Image (cartoon, rainbow, N blue to C red):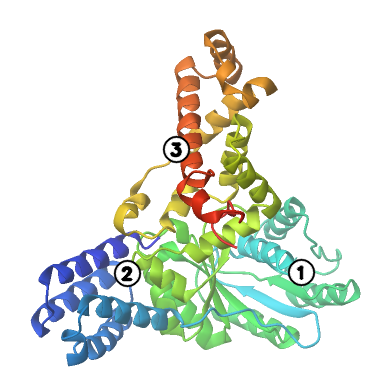
């Protein structure tokens, strides 16, 4: 996401650095390029104009133009204004003083309301809450069935409703009653949508709002629709009063105009973004982290969050011990690849790394996810002895492993070569005589990306 905008902004800053000294003229030229980059990223024209005016006011002062590192100051100003445009701080979900809290999930048909309801329920359950879902969409064929199937897949509670409950208000009322009786602290209400905004839809949603007195009314928008998503969010906010936005399909939106515009246009915060189809592909929205990604500074904090959520600390410490004591086997190599897959698409992870210096081309790397599957299959086809000691894998063994894994001898050879290189590199970095080993002494180096 934001790839096109990120590339263009980094080009602008590179050109500024090439000037040696900033002047009003080359600063004006840079601001024009930034404005064009924002508009090409489908940022709302009014938002782009306000952004440029704010940056210009701060960047054209004498204290910036005559500073020792003026370009760095300009980058900081652009970053600060971008964070302000995106919402300044992370907007957390609000809960009622007396549970259960009611969250209404609203939006146009096809925006991803039902899957977002299930993803949000999973996120809540992973973060200290006890949610319950209910679908009150009585119009779309199989809408309630879809949420029921997702709930069963995720092993999350859902209120199915009695056969005689055929109206949205009846379903919502009985769901809240069941949640209170069973100790659930949040009720997620998946509402009906339309292909367009109409009075009938808004009347129904207003009635549900009055009945539930929700602490959150979350508007779900499809990022791929760009400014149409912003426009519909603004309309829903004016007619219903939303409290936040969930932007889906952010992983498929290379421009990012909706994410950059929606807070400024609606006045309501972007709270979550959908970044894939998997149940865990819903992430809280952090304005500062997103601004840093756009400017090529990376998003290491989100990467750390992913590692901590998916990789056990004890496993990480044990792997570190094996690396330092030169006990890193092919079985460990396979386990590392499996853990890496838990973190999500590899290209997405590379996009979180700072795009600076030697890492500047990381996000352009194309990763073949099937290659990891092949590598795991090859190691799985080995015996325990072969995994523990790769030196015994001769020609006959390689042919047997290739046949057992459905690969070729050449692919087995490539795996062994990659393993040997990885082991050598890790030993040189973390071993007792290595760069970090000499400095760490008795201290442990966590295998993850942070603590």
Image quadrant holding the N terminus, namely bottom left
To which residue does mark 1 refer?
Answer: 131
Residue farthest top in this picture:
396
The answer for how far apart the CA atoms under marks 2 and 3 are is 30 Å
Q: Earlier in the sequence, mark 1 or mark 2?
A: 2
Q: Residue at x 37, y 63 (%)?
A: 2
Q: For this view, does 183 lie left or right of residue 228?
A: right
Image quadrant holding the C terminus, namely bottom right
Q: Residue 296 at what x, y percent from top left?
A: 34, 64
Q: Secondary structure at mark 3?
A: loop
Which residue is nearer to you in this view: 112 or 375? Answer: 375
Q: Residue 92 at what x, y percent from top left?
A: 61, 79
Which residue is nearer to you in this view: 175 or 182? Answer: 182
Q: For this view, does 29 lie left or right of residue 354?
A: left
To which residue does mark 2 refer?
Answer: 42
Residue 150: numbered disc:
none
In the figure, residue 284 lies in which quadrant? Answer: bottom right
Of tags 1 and 2, which is closer to the observer? 1
Q: Residue at x 36, y 50 (%)?
A: 362
Which residue is nearer to you in this view: 261 or 194? Answer: 261
Q: Residue at x 58, y 43 (%)?
A: 324
Q: Residue 218 at what x, y percent from top left?
A: 60, 76
The answer for how far apart the CA atoms under marks 1 and 2 are is 36 Å
Density class for disc 2 (Cα within 10 Å; few <14, some 14-19, many ≥20) is: many
In the figure, residue 167 lies in which quadrant? Answer: bottom right
Q: How many marks?
A: 3
Density class for disc 3 (Cα within 10 Å; few <14, some 14-19, many ≥20) is: few
To which residue does mark 3 refer?
Answer: 368
Of tags 3 and 1, which is closer to the observer? 3
């Amino acid at each position: 996401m934001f790839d096109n905008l990120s590339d263009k902004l980094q080009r602008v800053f590179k050109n500024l650095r090439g000037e040696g000294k900033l002047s009003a003229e080359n600063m004006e030229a840079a601001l024009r390029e930034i404005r064009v980059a924002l508009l090409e990223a489908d940022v709302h024209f009014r938002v782009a104009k306000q952004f440029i005016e704010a940056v210009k006011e701060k960047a054209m002062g004498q204290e910036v133009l005559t500073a020792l590192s003026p370009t760095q100051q300009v980058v900081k100003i652009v970053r600060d204004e971008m964070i302000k445009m995106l919402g300044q701080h992370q907007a957390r979900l609000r809960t009622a003083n007396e549970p259960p809290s009611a969250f209404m999930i609203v939006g146009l048909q096809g925006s991803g309301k039902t899957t977002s309801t299930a993803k949000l329920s999973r996120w809540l359950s992973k973060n200290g809450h006890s949610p319950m879902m209910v679908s009150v969409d009585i119009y779309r064929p199989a809408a309630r069935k879809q949420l029921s199937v997702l709930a069963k897949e995720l092993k999350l509670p859902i209120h199915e409703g009695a056969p005689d409950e055929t109206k949205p208000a009846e379903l919502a009322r009985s769901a809240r009653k069941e949640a209170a009786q069973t100790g659930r602290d949040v009720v997620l209400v998946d509402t009906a949508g339309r292909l367009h905004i109409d009075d009938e839809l808004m009347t129904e949603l207003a009635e549900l709002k009055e009945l539930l007195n929700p602490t959150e009314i979350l508007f779900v928008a499809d990022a791929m629709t760009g400014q149409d998503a912003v426009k519909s969010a603004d309309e829903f906010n004016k007619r219903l009063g939303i409290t936040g936005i969930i932007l889906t399909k952010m992983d498929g939106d290379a421009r990012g105009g909706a994410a950059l515009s929606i807070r400024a246009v609606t006045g309501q915060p972007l709270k979550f973004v959908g970044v894939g189809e998997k149940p865990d592909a819903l992430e809280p929205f952090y304005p500062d982290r997103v601004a840093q990604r756009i400017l090529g500074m990376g998003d290491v904090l989100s990467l750390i969050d992913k590692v901590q959520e998916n990789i056990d600390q004890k496993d990480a410490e044990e792997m570190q011990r094996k690396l330092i004591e030169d006990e890193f086997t092919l079985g460990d190599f396979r386990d590392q690849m499996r853990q890496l897959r838990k973190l999500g698409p590899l290209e997405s992870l590379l996009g979180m790394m700072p795009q600076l210096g030697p890492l500047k081309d990381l996000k352009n790397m194309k990763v073949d996810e099937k290659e990891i599957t092949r590598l795991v299959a090859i190691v799985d086809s080995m015996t325990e002895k072969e995994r523990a000691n790769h030196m015994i894998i001769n020609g006959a063994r390689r042919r047997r492993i290739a046949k057992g894994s459905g690969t070729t001898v050449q692919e087995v050879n490539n795996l062994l070569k990659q393993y040997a290189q990885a082991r050598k590199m890790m030993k040189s970095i973390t071993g007792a005589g290595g760069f970090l080993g000499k400095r760490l002494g008795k201290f442990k180096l966590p295998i993850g990306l942070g603590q």
